Image (cartoon, helix red, strand yellow):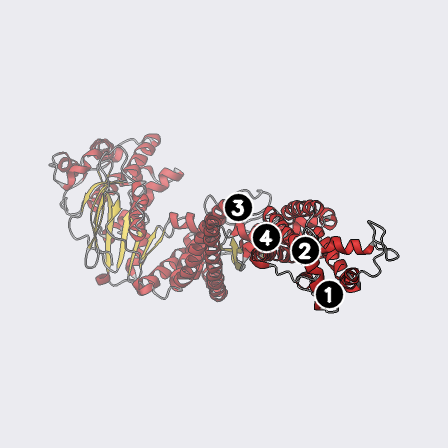
């Protein structure tokens, strides 16, 4: 509850207010204030206290004053202080009906725009609906902010997106096992398809073919002739040893072949009876000739074991294989071991030379068993070693050729477009999962998931709000129309619905006049089109706004915890609606925690006062002290609204506005109106037997700390009006009845009087 405004400094008309006397608030509070005395300022102070928004106060800082605004309000158990442009705490349980409420929530400048519809929606759906709508609004703000963040993340990531891939497809790529190997294989496949004609025509590698040792080499070297007797062999060898200079068997064998007709080829003498010749014939017979042929054949094979042509072939094969390997390695991964060609040829030649020596020995001594010996074993071992290297070389060639053959088959049946698409995909995966790119993707995906979560939360909240709104809007419209009927309006509202424009819920409705629906329109709606602006009077619009506010309060389940403040709720309404407005406010006052009504209509406040027990009501006034300053003082509503004062006031206002009325009666009413006004505004300052001249003297002589001191700004006007009006009173002018009255002059002084009292 609001207990008391203790002080206000430099806020609007409240230049330096401090509470004096019994100005503590009650459950129902009626505050009278003439126009421009600070009623709207008080509402803005309370609105600022409610929201904690200092702008409502800062915008009303007293002009021409350099000091900051300060406010101290006593609440139920603590004080609320506004200092250094902020409240030390807020008091949210305040509902205010004033021009600001109307302009922010219902209409402004006679038209309704989208902001009004959004705010009106919150009024209709109440605290529970506002909570849901706020949740949607907060989520909508978060979504917009998140969308900006998401767009920025997308822009940062976009430059890493692989050519040929959409952004979403790139981000959603999955990592694959053995990607590097797959990428290598697919790149090779693409290149092979791209160079298919060359691949299909390119030769395979060749093997190195080295000769084996003749199979019968060792056996021929060790072969002996079984059909030559030992006696014949003994004679032959003895003869060769004794009669020749170590003639070879081959020479002797050839010589035997020249014998003809049993005559010596040299001397032509008969050798028929020569026993030695017979031995030679037996020794160099068919078996010997056959063995000699075998040895000769063996010698031929050994000569062919390694030749210049073979060496050249080896060299060409290795060179060609090296070239082919470089080509095929672009498509297939294989390795051909290095082969020491020089060493191979050297060892082959060494073996060939050794074998040649051994066969020559055999050829010379066919019947002699030739054993190869250690030299042969060494060169043979060396050859077998190098031959193993050749075997490994050939195995690698075979493996390579299998890969090459497979590559040719793949190339022959491959589809370049398909392979290219897969290659692009694999390259994109590689680029997608680079550290920097992957980090951006993770951040983007996380942000996307968060957005989906926010969207889902908003959807759920919207569904809840829609369900709630459907029920409450129907109930709200029904109650509004009941109020409008009781106010006696000629219109009602219909088709009240919610809308979502810009992600925020709002309300739209139609005005129905004579069963004809009229759209709300807006400030840009043509004046030729019937709409809210041109079909309702100012009183109707004001009544509709009050109906919205009252219905909001009635549907509020927490009204008993709310402080309700109404500023001139009867403004612009027809007199016929005065009583019903009073009845509605009284009902609100019964149910609310506290009610404050501000008005410049004392008679309307008297209606409220008449229906409320005095123990629960407090009457105050916003009193002008001096030219600018406003104070909050006690107000005697009974005296203020007495019959004589109202009659005199009505007499002055009628004469000023319409020019009618008895001029002398009007002139006589000026002084009592001013006297009553000053008594009301400056209570307990004047005695019952004092009149206006005495009031003026007291004000003139007031000290600076006196309540009357602030009224010194009125002295000139009070003295001038008093000098004019006392001419018509017998107490100061015995010939008052004969005093001539000039209507023009009277009109001027009546208006000056009304200006002093603020129109009342």
Residue 529 position in % (x across, y down): 59, 46
- Measure the C-alpha gap from mark 2 to mark 4: 66 Å
- Measure the C-alpha gap from mark 1 to mark 2: 15 Å
- Which of the two discs, 4 and 1, labels the residue nearer the N terminus? 1
* Marking on residue 242: 2
Front residue of this view, candidates 184 and 532: 184
Residue 309 position in % (x across, y down): 71, 45
From the viewer's perspective, is the residue at label 2 or at label 4 nearer?
A: 2
Can you tell which quarter of the image residue 364 is in?
Answer: bottom right
Q: Which residue is mark 1?
A: 232
From the viewer's perspective, is the residue at label 3 or at label 4 nearer?
A: 4
Q: Is residue 535 visible?
A: yes
From the viewer's perspective, is the residue at label 4 or at label 1 nearer?
A: 1
**Crowdedness near tag 3: few (<14), some (14–19) or many (≥20) residues, C-alpha within 10 Å:** some
- Which of the two discs, 1 and 3, labels the residue nearer the N terminus? 3
- Which of the two discs, 2 and 4, labels the residue nearer the N terminus? 2
Can you tell which quarter of the image residue 739 is in?
Answer: top left
Can you tell which quarter of the image residue 214 is in?
Answer: bottom right
From the viewer's perspective, is the residue at label 1 or at label 3 nearer?
A: 1
**Crowdedness near tag 2: few (<14), some (14–19) or many (≥20) residues, C-alpha within 10 Å:** few
- Which of the two discs, 1 and 2, labels the residue nearer the N terminus? 1
Residue drawn at the location 39% of the way across and 55% of the way down: 578
Q: Which residue is mark 4?
A: 335
Q: Which residue is mark 3?
A: 160
- Measure the C-alpha gap from mark 4 to mark 1: 64 Å
**Crowdedness near tag 4: few (<14), some (14–19) or many (≥20) residues, C-alpha within 10 Å:** few
């Amino acid at each position: 509850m609001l207990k008391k405004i203790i002080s206000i400094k430099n806020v609007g008309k409240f230049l330096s207010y401090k509470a004096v006397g019994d100005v503590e608030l009650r459950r129902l509070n009626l505050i009278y204030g003439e126009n421009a005395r600070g009623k709207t300022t008080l509402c803005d102070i309370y609105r600022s206290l409610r929201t904690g928004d200092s702008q409502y106060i800062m915008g009303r800082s007293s002009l021409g004053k350099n000091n900051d605004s300060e406010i101290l309000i006593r609440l139920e158990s603590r004080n609320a202080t506004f200092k250094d442009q902020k409240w030390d705490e807020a008091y949210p349980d305040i509902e205010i009906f004033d021009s600001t409420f109307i302009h922010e929530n219902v209409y402004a400048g006679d038209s309704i725009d989208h902001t009004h519809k959004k705010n009106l929606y919150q009024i209709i759906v109440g605290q529970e609906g506002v909570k849901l709508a706020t949740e949607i609004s907060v989520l909508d703000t978060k979504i917009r902010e998140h969308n900006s963040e998401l767009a920025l993340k997308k822009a940062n990531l976009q430059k890493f997106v692989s050519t040929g891939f959409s952004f979403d497809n790139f981000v959603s790529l999955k990592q694959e096992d053995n990607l590097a190997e797959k990428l290598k294989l697919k790149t090779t496949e693409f290149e092979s398809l791209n160079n298919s004609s060359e691949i299909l025509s390119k030769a395979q590698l060749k093997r190195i073919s080295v000769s084996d040792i003749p199979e019968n080499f060792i056996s021929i070297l060790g072969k002996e002739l079984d059909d030559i007797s030992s006696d014949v062999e003994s004679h032959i060898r003895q003869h060769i040893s004794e009669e020749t200079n170590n003639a070879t068997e081959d020479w002797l064998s050839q010589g035997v072949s020249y014998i003809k007709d049993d005559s010596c080829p040299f001397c032509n003498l008969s050798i028929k009876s020569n026993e030695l010749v017979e031995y030679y014939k037996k020794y160099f017979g068919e078996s010997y000739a056959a063995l000699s042929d075998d040895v000769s054949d063996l010698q031929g094979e050994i000569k062919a074991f390694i030749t210049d042509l073979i060496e050249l072939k080896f060299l060409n094969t290795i060179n060609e294989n090296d070239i082919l390997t470089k080509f095929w390695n672009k498509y297939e991964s294989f390795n051909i071991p290095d082969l020491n060609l020089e060493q191979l040829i050297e060892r082959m030649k060494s073996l060939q030379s050794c074998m040649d020596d051994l066969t020559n020995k055999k050829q010379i001594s066919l019947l002699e068993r030739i054993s190869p010996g250690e030299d042969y074993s060494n060169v043979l071992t060396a050859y077998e070693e190098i031959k193993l290297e050749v075997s490994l070389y050939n195995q690698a060639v075979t493996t390579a050729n299998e890969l090459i053959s497979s590559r040719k088959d793949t190339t022959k049946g491959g589809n370049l477009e398909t392979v290219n698409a897969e290659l692009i995909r694999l390259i994109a995966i590689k680029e997608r999962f680079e550290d920097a790119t992957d980090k951006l993707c993770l951040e983007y995906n996380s942000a996307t998931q968060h957005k989906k979560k926010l969207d889902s939360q908003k959807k759920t909240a919207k569904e809840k709000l829609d369900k709630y709104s459907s029920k409450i809007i129907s109930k709200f419209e029904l109650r509004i129309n009941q109020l409008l009927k009781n106010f006696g309006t000629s219109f009602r509202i219909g088709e009240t619905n919610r809308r979502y424009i810009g992600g925020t819920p709002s309300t739209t409705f139609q005005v129905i006049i004579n069963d004809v629906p009229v759209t709300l329109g807006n400030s840009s709606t043509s004046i030729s089109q019937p709409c809210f602006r041109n079909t309702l009077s100012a009183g109707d619009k004001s009544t509709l706004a009050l109906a919205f506010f009252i219905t909001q309060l009635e549907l509020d389940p927490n009204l008993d915890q709310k402080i309700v403040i109404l500023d001139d709720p009867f403004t612009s309404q027809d007199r016929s609606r005065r009583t019903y407005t009073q009845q509605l406010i009284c009902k609100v006052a019964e149910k609310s925690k506290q009610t404050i009504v501000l008005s410049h209509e004392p008679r309307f406040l008297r209606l409220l006062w008449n229906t409320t027990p005095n123990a629960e009501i407090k009457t105050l006034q916003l009193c002008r002290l001096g030219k600018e300053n406003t104070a909050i003082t006690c107000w005697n509503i009974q005296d203020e609204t007495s019959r004589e004062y109202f009659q005199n006031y009505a007499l002055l206002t009628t004469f000023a506005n319409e020019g009618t009325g008895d001029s002398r009666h009007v002139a006589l009413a000026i002084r009592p109106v001013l006297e009553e006004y000053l008594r009301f505004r400056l209570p307990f300052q004047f005695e019952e037997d004092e009149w206006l001249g005495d009031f003026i003297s007291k004000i003139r002589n007031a000290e600076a700390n006196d309540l009357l001191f602030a009224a010194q700004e009125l002295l000139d006007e009070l003295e001038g009006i008093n000098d004019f009006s006392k001419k018509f009173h017998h107490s100061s002018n015995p010939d008052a009845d004969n005093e001539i009255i000039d209507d023009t002059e009277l009109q001027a002084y009546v208006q000056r009087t009304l200006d002093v009292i603020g129109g009342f």
